[in-house]
Amino acid sequence: MLEELNEKYSIPGRLEFVRGKEDFILAELRNPHSRCTVSLYGAHVLSFKPEGREDILWMSGFSFFEKGKPIRGGIPVCWPWFGAHTSDNAMPSHGFARISRWNVKSASNDDGVTELVLSLKNTDVNPGKFKVEPFELKLAVRCGKTLEVELLTENNGMENFIVSEALHSYFSVSDIGRVSISGLDGAAYIDTVNGLHASKVQSGDVRFDSEVDRIYSKSVCDCIISDSGSARRIKVSKTGSRTTVIWNPWIAKAARMPDFGNEEYRSMVCVETANAGTDKVSIPPGRNHGMKTVISCEYD
Ligand code: TA6
């Protein structure tokens, strides 16, 4: 498998396929600007490291790397539903895309950007478990001065396709107590902590002194994660997304997750590019819908 992938898609000095933990097949992208690692399982970006800098993405030291279980950290692909399934609690949280084995569609390198495109079709997922209309899902990862991740849904069926989705990005921070997130001031959100689902309005920057789990609807803004402890500002821009989700599990929720260290909540924050809740996407037969997140970083 690995040999065939490298035979067909590797680009000397820019892209190669290697075996990672638990024999997962990983694509290593690199160029003069940055390097990035992508797992074919889940089409999951595991890391993005600008040249000479620290990783911008966060990965739990306790993450599973087991088929059928999601990877904790990086950029999970949540699709074709966000959060719990609306009617069947036996279905996996955040859909099946992140626990499926994707195929390589293409690989290229041009003008300082190394691109890998992965594909998942309805014929690649377990029809007994997930009843889905004909679709093709493509994930394009473009690694250069910035990290671009684009999720393209193609409806190849005869019915309207209703999708909620997220690029559920985990970012590495020096300490959550030293972090503020700008770009959401005045935005309406649903506070889902403790399952309350209270409607609120953001006032000023988002700061953290307890669990934060907020779904900002009609939110098309850039968000800036300012981290005074690491003297950097991470910018999350997006297109094709009307929902922004901000999450930090804090102490109790972190302790309840087996794939999340008890103290790890201090070193991460999620700023998710999504279409969820009232921003679900309806894709007519034969049409497609794209959602893209663009991650960049400035340093003091
Ligand atoms: O980030 C929003 C959220 O839906 C949180 O409620 C939390 O559950 C998180 O995603 C992680 O979900 P997961 O299924 O990956 O444990």
Image (cartoon, rainbow, N blue to C red):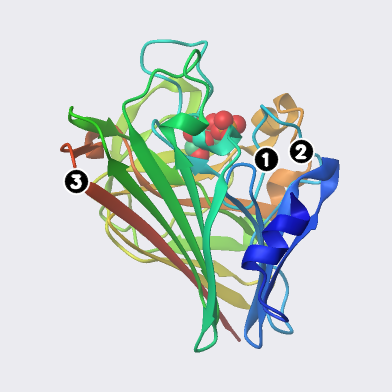
Where residue 253 appears, x then y in whole percent?
A: 65, 29
Label 1 – label 3 distance at C-alpha: 30 Å
Residue identified by numbered label 2: 65
- Secondary structure beneath label 2: loop
**Distance from mark 2 CB to nearest ligand 1 atom below 8 Å:** no
Q: Is residue 139 above or below residue 238?
A: above
Q: Are marks 1 and 3 in contact (CB under 8 Å)?
A: no
Give the label, 1 or 3, closer to the camera.
Answer: 3
- Secondary structure beneath label 1: loop
Figure quadrant of the C terminus: bottom right
Reading the chain from its start, which is encountered first: label 1 or label 3?
1
Label 1 – label 2 distance at C-alpha: 6 Å
Residue at 64%, 38% (x, y): give it: 250
Where residue 77 appears, x then y in whole percent?
A: 50, 44
Residue at 58%, 61% (x, y): give it: 179
Reading the chain from its start, which is encountered first: label 3 or label 2?
2
Residue identified by numbered label 1: 71
Quarter holding ligand 1: top right
Label 3 – label 2 distance at C-alpha: 34 Å
Q: Is residue 232 above or below residue 112?
A: above
Question: How many residues crowd around disc 3 within 10 Å: few (fewer than 14), some, or many (20 or more)?
Answer: some
Residue 265 appears in which quarter of the rendering? top right
Identified by mark 2, the residue type is Phe
Q: In the rendered structure, find residue 287 and report the number of the disc placed on it.
A: 3
- Number of callouts: 3
- Secondary structure beneath label 3: loop
